[in-house]
Image (cartoon, rainbow, N blue to C red):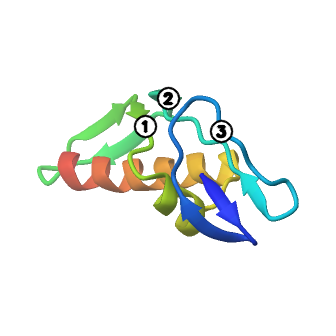
Amino acid sequence: MLQKFGRFDKVIKPGFHVINPWTESVIQIDMKTNILALQPQKIITKDTVSLQIETVVYYRTVDPYKLVYKLGTNLNEIRMFIAEMSYSALRTVAG
């Protein structure tokens, strides 16, 4: 992503780009598929059966603008957000 004077300008494609270091900055974002192994979750279903589910989440960045300006660039915070959303979806589906 390219920022001019600290504001979003555009998403740049991989390759060679000329930037002005005084007015522009580049934020690098990993667009590859990432893997997040979650802690086993204990769930009680509607018919009162106890389950322990081990989960692995595969995720990738689709919109870099939303990632940077809504979640931030801190990798630990992003992983915590994905883990909480995955736990919530898992409880909804398995419950």
Q: Which residue is mark 2?
A: 34
Q: Along the polypeptide, which appears first: circle 3 or circle 2?
A: 3
Whole-percent x and y of residue 21? 85, 53
Identify which amino acid the numbered label 3 is placed on.
His
Tell me the element at label 2.
strand
Tell me the element at label 3.
loop
Identify which amino acid the numbered label 1 is placed on.
Arg
Whole-percent x and y of residue 49? 21, 42
Q: Which mark is residue 17?
A: 3
Q: Are marks 2 and 1 in contact (CB under 8 Å)?
A: yes
Q: Which mark is residue 60?
A: 1
Is 53 situated left or right of 26 in this image?
left
Whole-percent x and y of residue 52? 36, 33
What's the distance in space between the residues labelled 2 and 1, CA to CA? 6 Å
Q: Is 72 above or below relative to 75? A: below
Is 17 situated left or right of 70 in this image?
right
What's the distance in space between the residues labelled 3 and 1, CA to CA? 24 Å
Is 51 situated left or right of 73 in this image?
left
Q: Are marks 3 and 2 in contact (CB under 8 Å)?
A: no
Using a 10 Å C-alpha cutoff, classify the residue at mark 2 as few (fewer than 14 neighbours), some (14 to 19) or many (20 or more).
few
- At 30% from the left and 36% from the top, the residue drawn is 51
Q: Residue furthest right?
A: 22
Q: Is 92 above or below relative to 50? A: below
Q: Which mark is residue 47?
A: none
- At 48% from the left and 28% from the top, the residue drawn is 32
Q: Is 15 above or below relative to 66? A: above
- At 76% from the left and 55% from the top, the residue drawn is 25
